Amino acid sequence: MDIQALTQHAKEFLLQDRELAPVLFAELSGKEITLHFFATFPNSLRAQRAAMFELGRSHGKRHKNAEITQLCLIQEVWGQTSACGAPIPPYKPSEDPARKEYLLVHVLNVGPGQQYEYQGRFIEILRAGGSIDLAPESEPYEAKEGLLDYFLAGFRSRDLSEKKLRKLLKAAVSR
C-alpha cells in the first residue's frame, strides 16, 4: 500500500466531514485491500484491543485462503506539548485549549514467517478559518507494538474453534 496515498485519502475525508473516524486498511496476500471504518471506537485501550482482535478474527474467517501482508491504521488524536523541564499539563489533551491535532498513522508490514516491521508517524492537522490542511509528515518512528498486533492475532486465530479460543484466552488472562 502506498502510505502517502492512504494519508491523502484521510485528508480528503477530513476535508469532507471535518473529522476522521479511525480507518483500517488491510492488504491481503499483496493483492486485495479491504477498508474498515469504525463508526464507534472504544475509549479504553483494553476495549480497543478486544475490538481489533474480534474484527481481525471475523476478517480472517471471511478470507480463509489469504494472508495479511500489510495493515495500516489511521486515526485522529490529540496531543499536548510543554517546554523541557516544565510540568506536564494536569489535564487530558482533549481538555487542553492549546492541544494539537494529529493523524496517527501506524503501518505493520508482515513478512514471511514471524517477520514484522512496525512504523508510526504523526502528521499535524492544521485548522484555520474553516480550512483544513496537513503539515509535512514527520519522520517515521519504529514502533514495538500497537493495535494492529491485535487485528493480526485475531486474523490468525480464524481456524481455532470458539472453545479452543476461549481456553487460550482464559490461560493468557490468568498469567
Image (cartoon, rainbow, N blue to C red):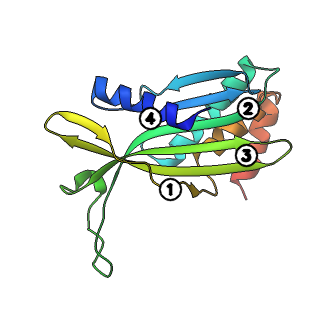
Tag 2: amino acid:
Ile
Tag 4: amino acid:
Phe
Q: Residue at x 77, y 26 (%)?
A: 29
In depth, the one of 105 and 166 nearer the eye is: 105
Secondary-structure class at tag 4: loop
Check residue 139 in the rendering and tell me which mark sits there, or answer none. Answer: 1
CA separation in Å, label 3 and label 4: 24 Å
Please identify, in this view, whether the residue under mark 2 or under mark 3 is nearer the observer: 2
Q: Residue at x 50, y 48 (%)?
A: 45
Judge the density around disc 1: few (<14), some (14-19), many (≥20) Cα neighbours within 10 Å.
few
Which residue in the protein does label 3 denote?
A: 170
Q: At which x and y percent is residue 6?
A: 51, 31
CA separation in Å, label 1 and label 3: 39 Å
Q: Residue at x 51, y 37 (%)?
A: 4
Whether residue 148 is situated above or below residue 33 in the rendered picture: below
Please identify, in this view, whether the residue under mark 4 or under mark 2 is nearer the observer: 2
Q: Earlier in the sequence, mark 3 or mark 4?
A: 4
Secondary-structure class at tag 3: helix
Which residue in the protein does label 4 denote?
A: 41
Q: Earlier in the sequence, mark 4 or mark 2?
A: 4
Q: Earlier in the sequence, mark 2 or mark 1?
A: 2
CA separation in Å, label 4 and label 2: 22 Å
Q: Are marks 2 and 3 in contact (CB under 8 Å)?
A: no
Image quadrant where residue 168 sits: top right
Q: At which x and y percent is residue 151?
A: 65, 37
Which residue in the protein does label 2 denote?
A: 68
Quick one: which residue is furthest to the right in this view?
A: 113
In depth, the one of 6 and 34 nearer the eye is: 6
